[in-house]
Amino acid sequence: MSAGHTMTQYTDFAHKHARFLYMIRVTLVMGFMLIIVRVFDVPYGYWALITAVTILGAIPFVGGVLSKAKQRISGTVMGGLLGMALFLIPPDYHWTHHIAFFVLLIAAMYFTQEHYAYAALMAAVTIVVVAGGGPADFEAAGWRILNVLWAGVLAVVVSVYVFPAKATDQFLLLVESFLHELSHYYTQHIESAKQGAFEPAHADRLNELVDKQQSILPHALKESGVHTPALNTILLIEKRLYAELEALISTQWDAQQGKDEISELDGLTDSQYALAKQFDALALQITNKKVTAILEQDIGILNLASSNIAHPKGDTRDISYFGYLWLNREMARQFAQLTVVTKKVFAYQ
């Protein structure tokens, strides 16, 4: 059995049983931490458990865990060092300690509104824990930093190597769903158009899928490495396809003056059906992790003879007539580009 086929099977399994596998990872991390804390009587050991909860909670993907672990560790170390620096102030100057502590805390909170908000938040929390008790609370500083470090490393190792949940895989599964739904909505439109009825509709499901991909894209980008530019481009193309399809199926074409010319265009319906089938075919290729790039000249709707799409009538009829054609043809062009980009994703596998 090929490695690619095995990986495909695992991806499907991980997607179907995501919560179960997540709980396995959580159980391993929490159980191992409890054993270490209890057997070795680690001071302030509950901070290790808090670290695991914050790193593994909410976002199960490897990219999310890596990002949160990095920010939690860096924020804790920075906050710990700043907090410990306050102990350089002689105990006799305890008011100086409290004023400096307040200034550092406010400064850390200021940076929670910046790019690395979570790291800044962890720095602020650490400053409070390390130095909030006053000049005599030095012991907590070192133990908090140490517990956060080893707990963060453990959470990352388990997330990466024990039934990993990869945002990149989830992203590509959503691309498959997007293409199937795109084909479904497009086919429905073609069927209606054949009957001469252009009932306005909305591709709500496509919008939901795009939103889901947008939410996990940052985590996928942290995992994918060479895939990073491709994943950004895939989502951009999907947004364009959604916008074009939405314009196509939501417009009341039967109220347009070019309605009859649209219905009578020779070869249009057959080329539309062919394009819908190509959407489904690309989804299947993504499932099999082997995509073939399609050239624009290989898409029927882009090869309608110029004599067939010439329109001799008035401008007002031309606008709706060519507008309808443009939306269909632009979808085909975006689809061709999508095949090229998705092929790049699997080029390194």
Image: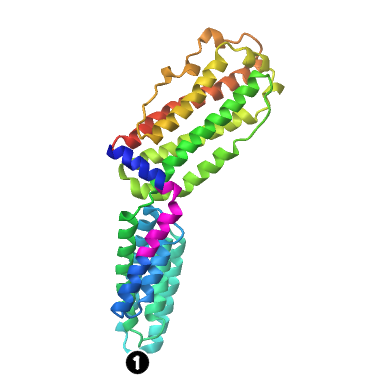
Q: Return the residue nearer the eye: 139 or 92.
A: 139
Magenta span? 14-28
The reply to whether the magenta stretch includes residue 27 is yes
Q: Main secondary structure of the magenta part?
A: helix
Residue farthest to the front, as pictured? 1
Q: Which residue is mark 1?
A: 92
Image location of residue 270, percent across then percent down: 54, 16
Residue shown at the point (47%, 14%) measured from the top left? 303
Task: Please name the residue shown 61% across and 26% down the image.
Answer: 189
Q: Nearer the viewer, residue 141 or 55?
A: 55
Q: Secondary structure at mark 1?
A: helix
Q: Nearer the viewer, residue 273 or 17?
A: 17
Number of numbered labels in the structure image: 1
Whether residue 205 is visible, yes or no, is yes
- The x and y percentages for residue 47 are 38, 74
In the depicted structure, whether residue 84 falls above or below residue 343: below
Q: Is residue 60 visible in the rendered structure shown here?
A: no
Quarter that holds the C terminus: top left
Type of the residue with mark 1: Asp
Q: How is the image coloured?
A: rainbow
Q: Is residue 25 magenta?
A: yes
Name which quarter of the figure residue 59 lies in.
bottom left
Q: Does 22 sit above or below residue 95?
A: above
Q: Please provide percent x and percent y for residue 105.
A: 43, 74
